Image (cartoon, grey):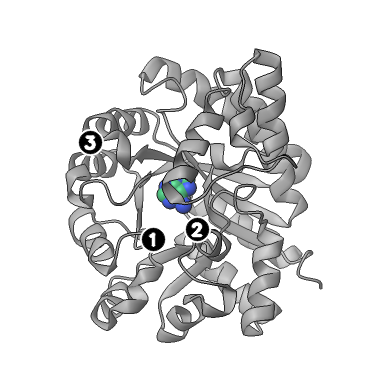
Amino acid sequence: MTVAELPKIELHLHHEGAAPPAFIRQLAHEKRIDLSGIFTPDGKYDFRDFAHFLSVYEAACEVLKTPEDFRRLTLAILEESAANGVVYSETFLSPDFCGGGDLHAWKDYLNAIQDAADEAERKLDITLRGVVTCVRHFGPEQAKRSANCAAETAGEWVTGFGMGGNESIGTQGDYKWAFDCAREAGLRLTTHAGEFGGPESVREAVRELGVERIGHGVRAIEDADLIRELIDREVTLEVCPGSNVVLGLFPDFTAHPIARLRDHGVNVTVSTDDPPFFHTTMRREYEMLGNAFGWDAEDFAALNDTALNAAFCDEDTRARVKKRLERT
Ligand code: ADE
Ligand code: ZN
């Protein structure tokens, strides 16, 4: 089986960050919004560094204004994921971009997204679950509103809560209320840490927020005690190597610590983060890992096992996806 054909599980995908630039340009055209400043002459997203990436991301979100926009976006994302062999995916949804944190509006957006996910599941045999995320640089008060939206819609489809955004703003602990609120609603927890923050950010995330997964977490490689703690606590890292390379954390795939973390015994998984921003797909991530570390079908099957174990879905769904993996 070729890498393209291998079934794949993706746990770390930002919904708006997965919007193809052509999709955003089309909406901008329909709504007569000028977004020309965020694209390169050949139509890709244009950004210099992480802070600029976040501002380009938020500019693109300005055209995503209605539940119908999100329905169309969800279909576009799932078509692309399915074409790359993804059979199960978890997407990060921010109430901030879906009604500004208002619960009523959030429910309308969520319905539209779930409708599209149901349609894609029927047509493309891909399963999607939602992880509601707050945005760290929007601050703890806004995070509480996102957590409340998450808690009020927690269930079979919204299964997790997390945090993205600029890791250099405040501390993980500043968001403890939001994470406690989500946990009490039965949601599983993840947060971005150890991407631009160092090992202490990862340690704080697991100790203070009690997350069971970490978005990125790759800078744990700098701290042997932390690596042991991640193993002891059975934390899973949602590693996004292509994203890390484009954002300058590591010069290339061969220098990326994912293989070393795996060899130490840390649970690692592979995702794309914001695929069109980082010129990647799940298929490309697998190909690059195969080239850099010699990973083969057996390694990728083990990676899928780790991801499926760490997936924030119920046990029926997990069993169904397991069968789907075995069938391919
Ligand atoms: N939001 C979207 N992509 C992100 C990333 N790589 N880090 C933090 N926040 C994000
Ligand atoms: Zn991310």
Contact? badges 1 and 2 (CB < 8 Å) = yes
- Helix, strand or loop at mark 1: loop
**Residue under circle 2?**
247
Distance from mark 2 CB to nearest ligand 1 atom below 8 Å: yes
Q: Is residue 202 above or below residue 131?
A: below
The mark nearer the N terminus, 3 or 1, is 3
Residue closer to the observer: 220 or 32: 32
Circle on res. 267: none
Crowdedness near tag 2: few (<14), some (14–19) or many (≥20) residues, C-alpha within 10 Å: some
Residue closer to the observer: 55 or 2: 55
**Residue flagged by tag 2: what amino acid is it?**
Leu
Q: Is residue 239 above or below residue 156?
A: below
x, y percent for residue 186: 32, 43
**Residue under circle 3?**
140
Residue 193 quadrant? bottom left
x, y percent for residue 179: 25, 44
**Residue under circle 1?**
195
| Quarter of the rendering occupied by the C terminus | bottom right
The residue at the point 71 percent across, 71 percent down is 287
| Quarter of the rendering occupied by the N terminus | bottom right
- Helix, strand or loop at mark 2: loop
Task: Give the Cα distance between marks 3 and 2.
Answer: 25 Å
On screen, residue 98 versus residue 60, left or right, reads left
Q: Is residue 57 above or below residue 13?
A: above
Crowdedness near tag 1: few (<14), some (14–19) or many (≥20) residues, C-alpha within 10 Å: many
On screen, residue 119 versus residue 130, left or right, reads right
Q: Is residue 47 above or below residue 145?
A: below
